[in-house]
C-alpha cells in the first residue's frame, strides 16, 4: 500500500499545474480569443453566389491595397478613383474591384502614368464592358494608350500619334472600339479643355478616325452599334454621327453635364445623363431626340450604366461635407431611386469618384455583404498586431499566474 501511495503521489505531482503553467494556458486562451473569430469570419464568408458580386458597402481608402501588377484576377466589376489631388501620405489611387465583390487592387499602370498637371491623380483609364481589361491613357504627350489585361497583367500599347495626349473615354460594345480625347498639347484636367478633340481608335488594328468638328471634349459614349456618339463638351451634350463626325442634335445646352462612357442603353434607343440636379433620358430612336427629365434625389450624380431598359445605375454623393456616396438604381420613367451600395470614407476622408462599371455585368449583379481582400499585407504590418496580441496575452497570463499563486495554500511556519 505504501508503494502504491507513492506512485499515486508522484502521478499527481507530475500533472499538477503550477502558477507558471496556469499563466501559459491563460495566455494561449487569450490569443485564441483574439485571432480565432477573425479566422472563423474568413472561413464563414468564403461562400460565393454564382455571378458577379457587388458589396453592399464599398471598402474605403487604404495604404495597403495591393497592386494589380503583382496579383491578378479575371475581371473587375468597378473601377474608381480613391481620393483627389496630392495630399501627405494618401495620394489618390486607381482602384479595381473584382467581379467576386471582395478583391481590391490598385491599377498601378494608371498611377504610374500620372503627370504634374494631374496633381497626383491617376491617369485617365476606362474599364471594358466585360470587365476583363482596362485601357490607360495619359495627359502627357506619350502618343499611345495601354491595354491592360487583368487576368495576367499583360500590357499592350496602341499608338495614337507621336507626341499626342490620349484620354480614354469609352469602350464600345464590341470590346475593340475606343473613344479617346486627343490633343497635341499636354492636357491640364484642372484647366482649359478647349484643346481636347475627339477620335475613334480600333484597339486591334490601330486604325484612328479623327472628328475635327468636335472640340472641347471631356466625356463621350458610343452607341451599341457604333453608329452614334454622345459627347459632352464645354458647349453641352451633343449627338454625333460616328461616320461623318457631323453633329446631329443637342441633348443639353448647358456645360454642367455629367456624362459617362456607359450612357447608352443596351438597345441603343436611349441615352442617360445628368445636368445639374436633373436626370435627363433622351429617346434617340426617332428622327429627333425626345427628352424626359427627373429631379434626382440626391441632388446630383452620374449615370454609369443600365440594369435594363427602364433602370439606370447612378453614382452620387450623399453628403459632400464628409465625402459619403452611394450607388442607386433610378427608374427612368418615374424617377424613383433605390440605394444598393454605399461608400463611407475612413479617417483619411478620401472620396470615391470617377466610378466606371463593367456594363455587361451590371444586370447580373448580386448585392450583399462581402469581406475585403486587399492582398497580402507588408510583413511589418502583420507583425505589429501579432506582437500586440502576444503582449496582451502575456500580461493577462502573468496576472492569472500571480492570482493563482496567491490562491494556493501556504506551508505555515509552525
Image: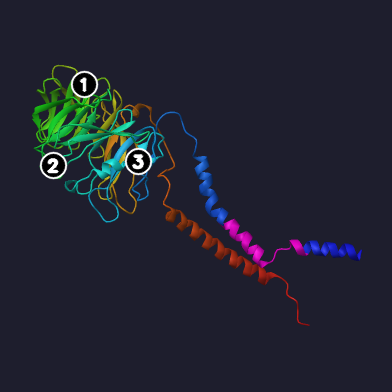
Looking at this view, name the residue that lies furthest to the right: 1
Asked whether residue 357 is in view, the answer is no
Q: Select label 1 or label 2 by which is in front.
A: 2
Expressed as whole percent of the image width and height from the top left, the position of residue 304 reads 27, 33
Which residue position holds label 2? 186
Which residue position holds label 3? 69
Is 252 on the left or on the right of 269, as rendered? left
SS of the residue under disc 1: loop
Residue 193, above or below 34 = above
Q: What stretch is highlighted in magenta?
A: 13-30
Is 108 on the left or on the right of 241, as rendered? right
Figure quadrant of the N terminus: bottom right
Q: Which of marks 1 and 2 is nearer the N terminus?
A: 2
SS of the residue under disc 3: helix
> Who is closer to the viewer here, 163 or 193?
163
Q: Check contact, mark 3 vs mark 1: CB within 8 A.
A: no
Residue 225 quadrant: top left
Q: Which of marks 3 and 1 is nearer the N terminus?
A: 3
Asked whether residue 195 is in view, the answer is yes
Residue 226 is labelled as: 1
> Who is closer to the viewer here, 202 or 297?
202
SS of the residue under disc 2: loop
Amino acid at each position: 500500500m505504501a508503494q502504491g501511495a507513492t506512485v499515486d503521489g508522484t502521478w499527481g505531482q507530475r500533472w499538477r499545474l503550477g502558477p507558471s503553467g496556469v499563466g501559459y494556458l491563460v495566455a494561449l486562451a487569450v490569443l485564441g480569443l483574439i485571432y480565432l473569430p477573425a479566422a472563423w469570419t474568413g472561413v464563414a464568408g468564403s461562400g460565393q453566389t454564382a455571378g458577379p458580386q457587388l458589396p453592399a458597402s464599398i471598402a474605403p481608402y487604404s495604404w495597403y491595397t495591393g497592386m494589380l501588377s503583382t496579383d491578378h484576377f479575371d475581371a473587375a466589376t468597378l473601377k474608381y478613383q480613391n481620393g483627389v489631388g496630392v495630399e501627405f501620405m494618401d495620394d489618390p489611387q486607381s482602384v479595381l474591384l473584382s467581379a467576386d465583390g471582395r478583391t481590391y487592387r490598385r491599377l498601378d499602370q494608371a498611377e504610374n502614368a500620372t503627370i504634374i498637371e494631374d496633381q497626383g491623380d491617376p491617369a485617365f483609364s476606362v474599364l471594358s464592358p466585360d470587365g476583363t481589361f482596362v485601357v490607360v491613357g495619359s495627359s502627357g504627350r506619350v502618343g499611345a494608350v495601354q491595354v491592360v489585361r487583368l487576368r495576367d497583367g499583360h500590357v499592350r500599347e496602341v499608338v495614337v500619334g507621336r507626341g499626342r495626349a490620349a484620354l480614354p473615354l469609352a469602350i464600345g460594345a464590341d470590346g475593340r472600339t475606343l473613344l479617346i480625347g486627343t490633343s497635341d498639347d499636354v492636357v491640364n484636367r484642372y484647366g482649359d479643355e478647349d484643346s481636347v478633340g475627339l477620335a475613334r481608335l480600333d484597339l486591334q488594328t490601330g486604325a484612328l478616325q479623327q472628328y475635327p468638328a468636335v472640340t472641347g471634349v471631356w466625356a463621350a459614349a458610343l452607341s451599341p452599334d457604333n453608329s452614334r456618339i454622345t459627347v459632352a463638351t464645354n458647349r453641352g451634350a451633343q449627338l454625333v454621327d460616328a461616320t461623318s463626325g457631323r453633329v446631329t442634335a443637342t441633348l443639353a445646352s448647358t456645360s454642367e453635364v455629367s456624362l459617362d462612357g456607359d450612357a447608352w442603353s443596351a438597345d441603343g434607343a436611349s441615352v442617360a445623363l445628368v445636368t445639374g440636379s436633373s436626370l435627363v433620358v433622351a429617346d434617340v430612336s426617332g428622327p429627333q431626340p425626345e427628352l424626359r427629365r427627373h429631379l434626382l434625389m440626391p441632388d446630383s450624380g452620374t449615370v454609369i450604366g443600365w440594369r435594363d431598359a427602364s433602370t439606370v445605375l447612378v453614382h452620387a454623393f450623399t453628403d459632400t461635407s464628409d465625402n459619403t456616396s452611394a450607388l442607386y438604381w433610378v427608374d427612368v420613367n418615374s424617377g424613383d431611386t433605390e440605394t444598393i451600395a454605399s461608400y463611407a470614407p475612413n479617417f483619411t476622408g478620401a472620396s470615391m469618384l470617377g466610378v466606371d462599371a463593367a456594363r455587361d455585368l451590371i444586370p447580373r449583379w448580386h448585392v450583399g455583404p462581402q469581406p475585403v481582400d486587399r492582398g497580402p499585407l507588408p510583413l511589418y504590418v502583420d507583425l505589429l498586431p501579432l506582437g500586440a496580441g502576444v503582449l496582451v496575452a502575456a500580461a493577462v497570463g502573468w496576472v492569472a499566474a500571480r492570482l493563482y499563486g496567491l490562491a494556493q495554500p501556504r506551508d505555515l511556519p509552525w
